[in-house]
Image: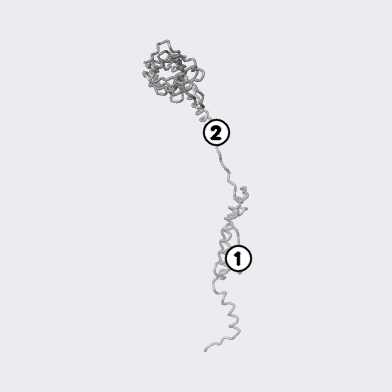
Amino acid sequence: MLSTKSESDITSLAPSSPSRSPKRPVYYVQSPSRDSHDGDKSSTVQPSPMESPSHPSSVGRHSRNSSASRFSGIFRSSSGRKGGRKRNDKGWPECGVIMEEGSYAEFEDKAFIRRFQALIALLTFVVLFTVFCLIIWGASRPYKAEIVVRSFAVHNVFVGEGSDFSGVPTRMLTINGTLKMSVYNPATIFGIHVSSNPVNLAYSEITVATGQLKFYQPRKSHRTVSVALEGEKVPLYGAGSSLTFAQNGAAEVPLILKFEVRSRGNVVGKLVRTKHRKQISCPLLINSLNTKLIKFKKNECTYD
C-alpha cells in the first residue's frame, strides 16, 4: 500500500535539502605589496557573501586586484627611490659626474712643461747655429779674391774730326781692346761669384770704352779672364783740344782704366756669406798708330 505524501510534507523537506550537501572550504590569498610602509607582509581579508567561490566574478576581480596591487607597488617603489634626484629643465634626472681631483691641472702642467722644453730646445738650436755661423763667417773673412791686371791689347784706335748727335763739331775717338786679368780664390771651403760695375776706359773723365766682368771662381783655383772694351765715335768736346799729334799723324791718348770688382762667397748656403770689394785703377798711354800689347807692371795699378 502506497503512502501518499502531502504537499505540506514536501514543502517542509525542500529547504532542508541543501543543508545536507557538504560545504566547500573558502581560501583567500593576497600578495603583500612592496611599497607598504608599515612592514606588514600579511593582511586578513574578511570573506563576504559576494566573494564566495561560487561566484566566478569575485575570483576574477580578486586576481585583477592582486595583479594591479603588485604592479602598482613596483612603480611606487621605483618612483620612491628616484624621488630624491634632481631634474634638469627638460625633465631628465641629473647625473653626477665623477672627476679625478687634479687630473686636469696635471694635464695642463705637463702640456706647459712640454711646450717650455720645446721652446728651450729651439732657442738652444738657434743659439748654437748662430754661434756656428759666426765662427764660420769669421774664419772665412780673410779669404779675399786676389785680382791682378795683366795687360791690355789694343785692336783699333782712331782719332778724328766729327760731330755729335746734335751736330756740334768736335774730335771723335774710337777704341776697341781686350783687358786680361788673373784671379785667384784662396778659400778652401767655398767658391766665389765675381762681378764688377762697368769696366771703364776714360779720357779726361769721359768714358771712351766700357765692358762688363762676371764669372764664378771655384775654391782654391786660378783663372785668367778677358774683358772686351769697346767705344765707337765718342765725342771728346773740349777735352779733345789737349790731344797732341806727331809729325806722322799719330796721336798719343792718355787713358785711365777704372772699375770695381765685387766678390761674394756662399759659405753656408745663403745664410752665411762673405763679400769683398776692390777698386782698381791703372793708367796707360795709347798711340793711335801702334796697337801693340800693353803690359802692366806690378806697381802700375792701384788696388784699394
Residue type for callout 2 = Glu
| Residue 81 seen anywhere in this rendered image of the structure | no
Tag on residue 47?
A: 1
Tell me where residue 246 appears, x and y as whole percent: 42, 13
Question: In this picture, is 60 found above or below 124?
Answer: below
Q: Residue at x 54, y 33 (%)?
A: 108
Secondary element type, mark 1: loop
Q: Residue furthest front?
A: 247
**Residue identified by numbered label 2:** 108
The percent coordinates of residue 104 (x first, y second) are 55, 35
Q: What residue is at 56 percent from the left and 39 percent from the top?
A: 99
Q: Is residue 185 left or right of residue 17?
A: left
Q: Tag 2's secondary structure?
A: helix
What residue lies at 51% left-to-right and 18% top-to-bottom?
Answer: 238
* Front residue of this view, candidates 134 and 91: 134
Q: Which quarter of the figure has residue 300?
A: top left
The residue most toward the bottom is 1
Residue type at mark 1 is Pro
Scheme of image coloration? one colour
Q: Position of residue 46 (x, y in %)?
A: 61, 63
Q: Nearer the viewer, residue 224 or 128?
A: 224
Q: CA distance from mark 1 to mark 2?
A: 75 Å
**Numbered label attached to residue 195:** none
Residue 139 coordinates in the image, percent (x, y): 44, 17
Q: Is residue 78 left or right of residue 220?
A: right
Q: Answer few, some or many: residues within 10 Å of disc 1's Cα (few below 14, many 20 plus, some between 14 and 19).
A: few
Which comes sooner in the sequence, label 1 or label 2? 1
Judged by depth in the image, the label closer to the viewer, 1 or 2, is 2
The crowding category of the residue bearing disc 2, from other C-alpha atoms within 10 Å (few below 14, some 14 to 19, many at least 20), is few
